[in-house]
Image (cartoon, grey):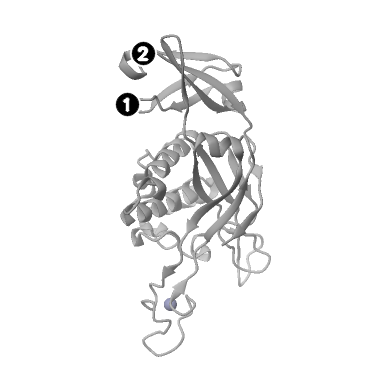
């Protein structure tokens, strides 16, 4: 099986912020809207999202690290290229030990790409979280070789988390997270909770001109502005650039990136504050 860290292109020592950056970068590049007619991008994206679902959860990441790639394949196997093993194989045992352990479901993570206009207007958008897939237990027939009904699926299909319609609030900024409580991976056992669906918004940057400079507004979490951190900025040309934010940076502050705009012009990065807390939203399954 592929290593989850390799799938996301990160070191095993990666911290949560860098892990998130790596995931968002890949999710943006592999997004179906950006790769029309390329089905391999969709299955890579599913793999990337599934790897992030595990590694972004500290308990699940510890479990994965402890048991290594081989043992971890028992609860998560991305080499199938299909997103997720059943929750009971990946979950974490909680509560008192008993015959049927209660396994809470994992959060599901997905990126929603929006244009600047869509972000300012808000409104209803669709996210495809995890498509249904053909059952690997019975090859999609719904029957075991013995002729019995397959216990893993319904008529040969394993239900994914499907697609959801989400109400996006107006004025949403890149990096903000829309939280649909209980819409993530299902748990198993009595009283088990489902995970949450976390929709990270990604808004196309808008570049304006001021004199000889180009200007772009870049959202940063309040905690990053307060305590410092690293931000990724996409200039109008060339590769993304990482900039270090000093502690106690005020929103509205500008950082000059020399020669990073078109024709060697400077890019001014204007920092915009966004809340760390996710925004609760309503979603409807479609
Ligand atoms: Zn089956």
Spot occupied by residue 139 in the image (x, y as percentages of width and height)? 36, 76
Secondary element at image label 1: loop
Horizontal side, residue 254 vs residue 69: left or right: right
Spot occupied by residue 29 in the image (x, y as percentages of width and height)? 37, 42
Residue labelled with disc 1? 238
Residue labelled with disc 2? 265
The Cα atoms of the two marked residues, 1 and 2, are separated by: 13 Å
Specify whether residue 91 is in view. no
Instruction: Quadrant for residue 143, please give it.
Output: bottom left
Spot occupied by residue 83 in the image (x, y as percentages of width and height)? 43, 59
Say which of 277 and 63 sits in front: 277
Horizontal side, residue 232 vs residue 276: left or right: left
- Which of the marked residues, 1 or 2, is nearer the chain's N terminus? 1
Which residue is found at the position 42% from the left and 44% from the top? 27
Which residue is found at the position 31% from the left and 53% from the top? 38
Say which of 57 and 172 sits in front: 172
Secondary element at image label 2: loop
Question: Where does ligand 1 appear, by image quarter?
Answer: bottom left
């Amino acid at each position: 099986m592929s290593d989850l860290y390799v799938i996301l292109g990160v070191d095993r020592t990666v911290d949560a912020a860098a892990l998130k950056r790596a995931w968002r970068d890949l999710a943006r590049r592999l997004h179906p809207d950006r790769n029309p007619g390329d089905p391999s991008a969709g299955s890579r994206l599913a793999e990337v999202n599934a790897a992030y679902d595990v590694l972004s959860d500290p308990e699940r990441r510890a479990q994965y690290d402890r048991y290594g790639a081989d043992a971890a394949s028992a609860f998560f196997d991305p080499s199938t290229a299909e997103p997720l093993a059943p929750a009971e194989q990946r979950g974490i045992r909680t509560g008192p030990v008993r015959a049927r352990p209660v396994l809470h479901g994992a959060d599901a993570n997905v990126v929603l790409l929006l244009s600047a206009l869509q972000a300012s207007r808000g409104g209803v958008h669709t996210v495809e979280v995890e498509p249904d897939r053909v059952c690997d237990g019975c090859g999609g027939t719904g029957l075991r070789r013995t002729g019995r009904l397959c216990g893993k699926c319904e008529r040969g299909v394993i239900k994914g988390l499907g697609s959801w319609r989400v109400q996006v609030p107006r004025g949403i900024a890149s990096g903000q997270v829309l939280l649909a409580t209980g819409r993530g991976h299902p748990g198993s056992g009595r009283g088990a909770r489902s995970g949450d669906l976390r929709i990270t918004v990604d808004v196309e940057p808008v570049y304006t001109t001021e004199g000889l400079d180009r200007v772009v507004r870049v959202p940063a979490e309040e905690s990053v502005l307060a305590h410092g951190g690293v931000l990724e900025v996409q200039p109008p040309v060339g590769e993304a650039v990482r900039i270090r934010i000093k502690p106690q940076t005020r929103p509205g502050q500008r950082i000059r990136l020399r020669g990073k705009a078109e024709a060697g012009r400077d890019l001014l990065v204007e920092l915009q504050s966004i809340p760390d807390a996710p925004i609760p939203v309503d979603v409807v399954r479609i």
